[in-house]
Image: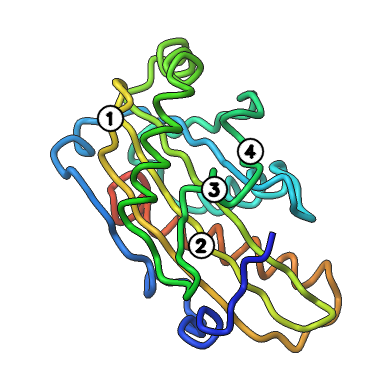
Amino acid sequence: MKRITTAMLICLMSISCSGIGVKKISANTSAIREVKKVGFLVRISRDVRLTRDDYVKTISHWFAGFVPLKDILFIADGSEKITFFNTNEHRFYQVNEAGEFLKFKSIGVVNLYLRDNRAELKKIIDDNSLDGIFVYEIYGVIANEMQFVDYDTMLVMADKDLKVIYMDMHRFSDDSNELDFDRIKIKFLDGISERVTKTLVGLGFLGR
């Protein structure tokens, strides 16, 4: 999976994960406010060095450091169809050859994902009495040998009828002086986790 282009690396050297660089695509404020209990599902590529458990564990640690304002349930037992993507064409995060984000293509991929997996997602929502579900898609490159970290994420929230009520995207790229994979892995996971945690604070699901 070739993900990194020169243009993307030049344009996205913002080091902060504090919310700078997170771009809101759409948000239905009133619908988000109605959600009291939400599922949280992590979606990743098969072609990665880290597992879903690595992501879920670190994100859950970040969430636990904040005050829960709404009930957030991690979905750990979803099928591979809803928790993994195989190719770039199946990703929520869509870009052109120049690395520019393709908003409407991304929206289309998200809508197809929700439609094609409707039965399983609705079962998760109904079985757990959820008002909605977050799907957090993550793709990243940890190149400790070349000393850089590069990743992009999309956070999608659907209501209980699987209509999208929130969507955003985030890009991050940073040079690193670290050669040890385990240490750069921690930085990578913390960055991804901090980004989504602060987003959920902004949406009113977590408090300080």
Q: Which residue is mark 2?
A: 194
Q: Is residue 182 above or below residue 57?
A: below
* Disc 3 element: helix
Q: Which mark is residue 89?
A: 3
Q: Residue 76's image quarter?
A: top right
The x, y position of residue 97, in whole percent, is 50, 70
Which quarter shows the C terminus? bottom left
Q: Earlier in the sequence, mark 4 or mark 3?
A: 4
Categorize mark 2 by other alpha carbons within 10 Å: few (<14), some (14-19), many (20+). some
Query: Residue at 69% across / 43% down in the picture?
Result: 52
In the displayed structure, does residue 39 sit left or right of residue 77? left
Distance from the alpha carbon under mark 1 to that under mark 4: 21 Å
Color scheme of the displayed model: rainbow
Name the residue located 54 percent from the left edge and 33 percent from the top edge.
Answer: 74
In the figure, is residue 2 to the left or right of 12? right
Secondary structure category for the residue under label 2: helix
Amino acid, disc 1: Lys
**Which residue carries the number 4 mark?**
84
Q: Nearer the viewer, mark 3 or mark 2?
A: 3
User: What amino acid is at disc 3?
Assistant: Glu
Mark 1–mark 3 distance (CA, rounded to whole Å): 21 Å
Residue at image point 58% right, 66% down: 151
Q: Which residue is mark 1?
A: 163
Residue 72 position in % (x across, y down): 44, 34
